Image: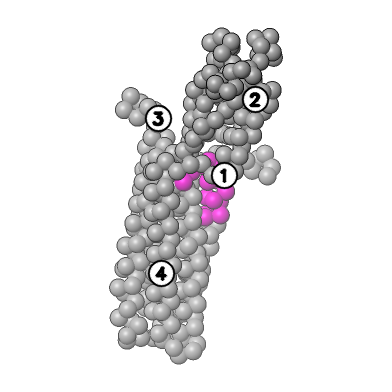
Amino acid sequence: MPVSGNAFLHWLTPRRLMAASAAVACAAIALKALAWQLTGSVGLLSDALESVVNLAGAGFGLLMLTVASRPADEGHPYGHYKAEYFASAFEGLLILAAAAAIAWAALPRLAQPQPVALAGWGLALSVGSSALNGALAWLMLRAARVHRSLALQADARHLLTDVWTSAGVLAGVLLAPLTGWLWLDPLMALLVALNILREGFGLLWRSSQGLMDEAVQAETLAQIQTVLARFAADGVARFDHVRTRQAGQRRFADLHMHLPPEWTLTQAAALRAQVAAALAEGVPGLCALIQILPPEPDEAAASPSPEESRLS
């Protein structure tokens, strides 16, 4: 990606994008509500309800991102990064509530289907709303990778779900009058409810894993191991008991660094600082806690001499 593109994505902070998501959600609610009023389609009503969820999720997400950006304090020495998980969980709960509301509205219509009027206007308004959501979701997903923001990623994936469910609703609104199968409209609404139900449970699961100190992803762990292998290449230092966790945008690693017993505390501290700096450079957002230990008993006999152990 060009440097200017990276700079633009860095400028698009999670808080700015979440505020934009709230604004787009307001526009989507207005467009979809008007489409529902013009057509009477329960499918478009379900689509409008999901946009209400988008607005509530974006508003709460913006609040939690504000909390997450606060610096560490005496009561929270590791920072407030996990606040993002609450935003994701809250949005998941709202999605489940919206799915129940959609099903409540669609089931009576499935038993007694009603005609859909002015489908052309409804389609045009809903397509315009979906285009806004799709463009914003694409931008948010790219920025979420740059900022490593779970709240931003969750909101973006929810917006993408809104785009796909809108497509299903539009298909029902279009096909119902063309085929005469009026039950297609409420059926599509129920399918929308099932789809966003799946997304809601997915968000709740990802949030729970983050709150339970889930380990970093496999590729991130591989980056950590690559950095450590570079420092262990000369056979002087050895690393083990590597444990990782992630909290919002931050990643943490705890590990043991075994050094020869002849090393002074000054030497050991200097190497630990080098390893910590290399880890922070190789894995952005990583905070490493490195415990210095002597070699294991079977390693002590084969430990290098002080001359061989001297830092280069």
User: x, y percentage for residue 125?
Assistant: 47, 69
Q: Earlier in the sequence, mark 2 or mark 1?
A: 1
* Amino acid identity at mark 1: Ala
Residue 202 belongs to magenta span = no
Q: Earlier in the sequence, mark 2 or mark 3?
A: 3
* Amino acid identity at mark 4: Leu
Residue sitting at 60 percent across and 25 percent down? 238
Q: What is the distance, in whole Å, between disc 2 and disc 3 at their CAs? A: 27 Å
* Amino acid identity at mark 3: Tyr
Q: Which residue is mark 4?
A: 194
Q: Which residues are magenta?
A: 136-150
Q: Which residue is mark 3?
A: 78
* Amino acid identity at mark 2: Phe
Comparing labels 2 and 3, the label whose residue is closer to the camera = 2
The answer to whether one can see residue 24 in this image is yes
Q: Earlier in the sequence, mark 4 or mark 2?
A: 4
